[in-house]
Amino acid sequence: MKTLKLGIIGAGFIAKFQAQAIAQIREIDITGVVSLESAQEFSQYVYDLGIGPCTVYENIRKMAQNVDAIAIFTPNFTRVAIVEEIVAAIKNGAALKGIICDKPLARNMAEARKILKLVDEVDVRTAYFENQVFMKLIRAQMQQLAPQQKSMGPLMLTRSSEEHGGPHMPWFWDPTKQGGGVLSDMGCHSIAVGWYTLTPPDKPLTFLQPVSVSCDCALLKWGQPKWREKLLQDFGVDYSKTPAEDFVTGMVTFKNPETGQLVKAQFTNSWMFEKQGLRLFMDGMGPGYAFEVNTLNSSLQVFIGDAAADAVADAEIALEKSTASRGLLAVQQNEADLYGYTDENKDAALAFLAGRDGFLSWEYGLEITKLIMAAYMADEKKQTIDLTDPEVQTELETYIPLIQQGRGAEILF
């Protein structure tokens, strides 16, 4: 069996999470890393997982000469520059089979278009990592309900959310670097999985046509003086000056081009979720059938009392973004697989080894970026955005949300 030699750019939280996922499949070895920080630590981590050896390279050009594919797991504001370096390496002889980019593809449409133009110059295969589309729970419900969809008609409504107490790293909180707040960070997940689950079986990913977007962004918890001060102390980010939204809810309406039927995908995301930790919730309604996913409904629960709580060194052992180390805790024993990371890596490896794009290409990532931009625009204008209007499509190409510009105080306070 062929194995993909993968080089990773970035050695932070998501890179380690992806390494945990890769350790569960046979199709990938992580053989290189480039990172400004923690590269040696990450290399040892990969070795301990048994999916190396992982060489630390001083730059992307050198790594590109020694791997089959590269995965970009770096902050959003670095994406364009990194793709430029990878493309330059390919033009200089690096025989890369493909490039992976974690969500979101870019902070706005102008950056996304530039990235796509760059990879088109070298005709390299791509994979856009949106893990929730690959969740086994989502795929299982689609398989289970396929007969009902065929006999009764497809889903009409999906509701998707991802919520937790806030990101790990300072740049995530900075809207000028991240691209916004929770809508940019996690809305991309919920919009993508909503679109995917609404799509009738055996139809292409983008079969349903987005026709409108409505959205409401708010700064609730992290806009309060006490919590603004905590952000400033912990991360050096001042939400009194450059705030981002910590809550968002909205709706994307899609049209079935064959039947004219309108269907809706609701999304809700927050950085102010105060329960056990990260929660993914999805449900869908069809004529005569439904499904529901809630990742906090674990088959394993543990209880830690006050007397024993001091023995817990890391609350996230139980669940990503966990904010508690005592009481009744939901425990997920394999989050990397539960959230879809394992299967998205396997898909990318098989696709690149076969000379094709991943199930989700960067073109798909561009469409998700457009819907995120339309959502920010809907919030700013306080109106539903008509995606069938050519003038709106043109406006979205150069649109930079006020929050992304660092002007969120104008609309959030």
Image (cartoon, rainbow, N blue to C red):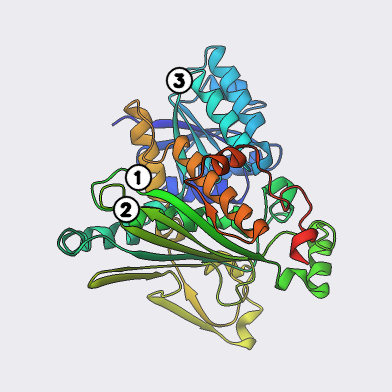
- Residue 300's spot in the image, x, y percent? 41, 76
- Residue at image position (52%, 18%) is 121
Tags 1 and 3 touching, CB below 8 Å: no
Specify the label residue 331 is tagged with: none
Q: Residues within 10 Å of mark 3 (few under 14, many from 20)?
A: few
Q: Quadrant of the N terminus?
A: top left
Residue at numbered disc 1? 205
Number of numbered callouts drawn: 3
- Residue at image position (34%, 57%) is 198
Specify the label residue 123 is tagged with: 3
Tags 2 and 1 touching, CB below 8 Å: yes
Element under label 2?
loop
Element under label 1?
loop
Q: Quadrant of residue 411?
A: bottom right
Viewer-side label of 2, 3: 2
> Earlier along the polypeptide chain: callout 2 or callout 3?
3
Amino acid at circle 1: Leu
- Residue at image position (60%, 43%) is 42
Residue at numbered disc 2? 199
